[in-house]
Image (cartoon, rainbow, N blue to C red):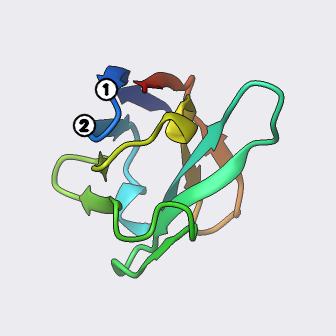
């Protein structure tokens, strides 16, 4: 069982920055792939960034060069550094973990990010 708790969301002006954190429970964190998704009102949930157990990262085209995903296995935490934020980044951001053995997807409760123009 993996529990995920996000934090760091809030209201920021366009061009600003936020750092999201996702604290994970359990002993498998270092072996699990982690990701951040987001869902804007009226839209489908979309992948923002992902990081493998080995540290390989991938990003949606819309955030490349602006967002950085990282993980600290000693703290069981994954981060999303978001720079040069745009109003279209406004969404609920969800942390996701894929269990290394079962491939089961775990989700956090989400954290709201609002970017004002």
C-alpha span from label 2 to label 1: 6 Å
Q: In this view, does 53 lie to the left or right of 37?
A: left
* Residue at 50% across, 32% down: 3
In the image shown, does 52 or 60 lie closer to the viewer?
60
- Asked whether the viewer can see residue 30, the reply is yes
Image coordinates of residue 28 in percent, x first then y, are: 42, 57
* Residue at 18% across, 47% down: 75
In the image shown, does 74 or 59 lie closer to the viewer?
59
Image coordinates of residue 51 in percent, x first then y, are: 43, 69
**Quadrant in the picture for the N terminus:** top right
For mark 2, what is the residue? Answer: 16
Q: Residues within 10 Å of mark 1 (few under 14, many from 20)?
A: some
Q: Is residue 57 above or below residue 98?
A: below
The image's mark for residue 110 is: none
- Asked whether the viewer can see residue 94, the reply is no
Q: Which quarter of the figure has residue 62?
A: bottom right
Q: Residues within 10 Å of mark 2 (few under 14, many from 20)?
A: some
Image coordinates of residue 111 in percent, x first then y, are: 48, 23
* Residue at 45% across, 74% down: 52
Disc 2 is placed on an element classified as: loop
For mark 1, what is the residue? Answer: 13
* Residue at 57% across, 71% down: 61
**Quadrant in the picture for the C terminus:** top left
Disc 1 is placed on an element classified as: strand
Q: Is residue 105 left or right of residue 97?
A: right
Q: Is residue 21 above or below residue 12?
A: below
The answer to whether the residues at label 2 and label 1 have Cβ atoms under 8 Å apart is yes
Q: Which quarter of the figure has residue 104?
A: bottom right
């Amino acid at each position: 069982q993996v529990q995920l708790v996000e934090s760091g969301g809030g209201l920021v002006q366009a061009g600003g920055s936020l750092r999201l954190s996702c604290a994970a429970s359990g002993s498998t964190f270092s072996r699990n792939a982690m990701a951040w998704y987001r869902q804007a009102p009226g839209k489908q949930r979309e992948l923002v960034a992902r990081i493998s157990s080995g540290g390989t990262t991938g990003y949606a085209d819309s955030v490349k060069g602006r967002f950085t995903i990282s993980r600290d296995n000693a703290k069981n935490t994954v981060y999303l550094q978001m720079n040069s934020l745009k109003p279209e980044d406004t969404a609920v951001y969800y942390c996701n973990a894929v269990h290394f053995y079962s491939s089961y997807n775990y989700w956090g409760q989400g954290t709201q990010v609002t970017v004002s123009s």
